[in-house]
Amino acid sequence: MPRAGLSAERVTLAGAELADEVGLDHVTMSAVARRLGVKDASLYAHVRSLDDLRGRIALLAADEKTIRIAEAIAGRAGKDALVAYAQAWRSYAHDHPGRYTATQTPMEIDPGLVARAPGPRRAIELTYSMLRAYALDEPDLTDAVRLMRSTLHGFVSLEAAGGFAHARPAEATWPRCLDALHTVLERWPARHEGDPR
Amino acid sequence: MPRAGLSAERVTLAGAELADEVGLDHVTMSAVARRLGVKDASLYAHVRSLDDLRGRIALLAADEKTIRIAEAIAGRAGKDALVAYAQAWRSYAHDHPGRYTATQTPMEIDPGLVARAPGPRRAIELTYSMLRAYALDEPDLTDAVRLMRSTLHGFVSLEAAGGFAHARPAEATWPRCLDALHTVLERWPARHEGDPR
DNA sequence: GGCATTGCCTAATGACCCTAGGTTATTCCT
DNA sequence: AGGAATAACCTAGGGTCATTAGGCAATGCC
């Protein structure tokens, strides 16, 4: 009887593919095992639990998304870079809806695993360095990074949840949101006196 | 043997409370039944399925959130109203994390149920009428509404997922994001020539 | 008090998560 | 090459959960 040649990576990938096809919460140990032509119990040699698998899918997604963004903004600057960054973010969410939702789920991921994943750390560096073009000083820079991430994530998240009625296509709203984001980054509002530093 | 006095509303409420306590995806028929002192099977007299229950929780949350926002912005205008609106949104998400996540899940909800729920429709009216203060014409108004929703939802969503590292408290970033939102609504960027209407 | 309604229960099926312990294919060692 | 060591994969089984079917008793109407 030949072997399937499993590994934590192959199991994670199968889970990620399944997540994109049927939704993250239909990713079950049994379903992943079926897809790999293997019995459920066999997966536990490579993955600690279903939650562990979900965590691994989330980290995979974070890495992939970061790489896509890095490639998109390479060699660009200013608004060009901003648009490329946002475009890459949104396209990743569209292409991999299951993996994308895995990244939003608040979960306890094995710290050892997180430490080995370059995605999250790299993503932060990329974002900060891109926004440095807007000449913001800390803590404004951090706030701007968070605003941008909120806007992008919120948009694709609402879009995926069907939050935008059919009246006007999301496609048309998207570039206007990027314009708005660019505008506010250029003219970042001053702090009022009395505001916390 | 006395009766529990169930109804679709009581079941939904129990589910909502449970969602806030242990997270939406730990809301199970069995758990809700236990909390109500009843057997699992009894719930099916009031709720069609687990998915149906989730949908009802989502609609309940939408209604509650809309009411909270409506009360917050009553009698306010301009930036005051914007801040009150955003504050109410975020505080609802904080107070009811399980119900809030129920609203983001893309699900098929019984259309008859949706039609009877005032929340979603009312929320749209509220938002549009509030943003009318910024004197935007369609389709800019729609885009602005979507940008605002994206920003607010994205912020609380990332916050809940632990997306903001501990370095700077989310509490400090929040008002700056509202400032930025207000700024961009006041100076809504013009469309470029060649842009789709 | 009789009767229909319906609220809740018992029973049962099947999916799924996960553990324990056994086999067999691979790998490595000499 | 031959055998030992190491995984990889399987069978068996217990527990939780979703959902359906059918029974009985509490409630409300006359």
Image (tube, coloured by chain):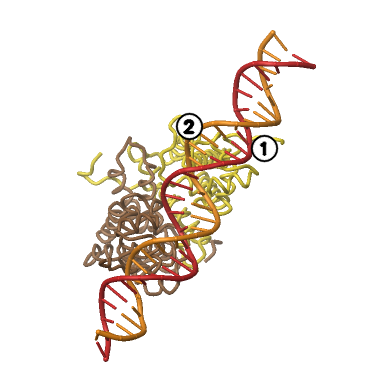
Chain colours: A yellow, B brown, C orange, D red
Judging from the image, what secondary structure is the residue with disc 1 in? loop
**On the image, which quarter does residue D12 sit in?**
top right
Give coordinates of residue B83: x percent, y percent.
27, 56
Judging from the image, what secondary structure is the residue with disc 2 in? helix
Please name whichever residue, A61 or B8, is drawn nearer the observer in this view of the structure.
B8
Please report whichever mark, 2 or 1, sits nearer to the chain's N-terminal start. 1
Give coordinates of residue B143: x percent, y percent.
44, 62
Q: Is residue B43 left or right of residue D5?
A: left
Look at the picture and state if A7 lies above or below B197.
above
Give coordinates of residue A145: x percent, y percent.
40, 42
**On the image, which quarter does residue A40 sit in?**
top right
Disc nearest the viewer among 2 and 1: 1
Q: Which residue is mark 1?
A: A4
Q: Which residue is mark 2?
A: A113
Name the quadrant of the N terminus of chain B: bottom left
Q: Chain of mark 1?
A: A
Q: Residues within 10 Å of mark 2 (few under 14, many from 20)?
A: few
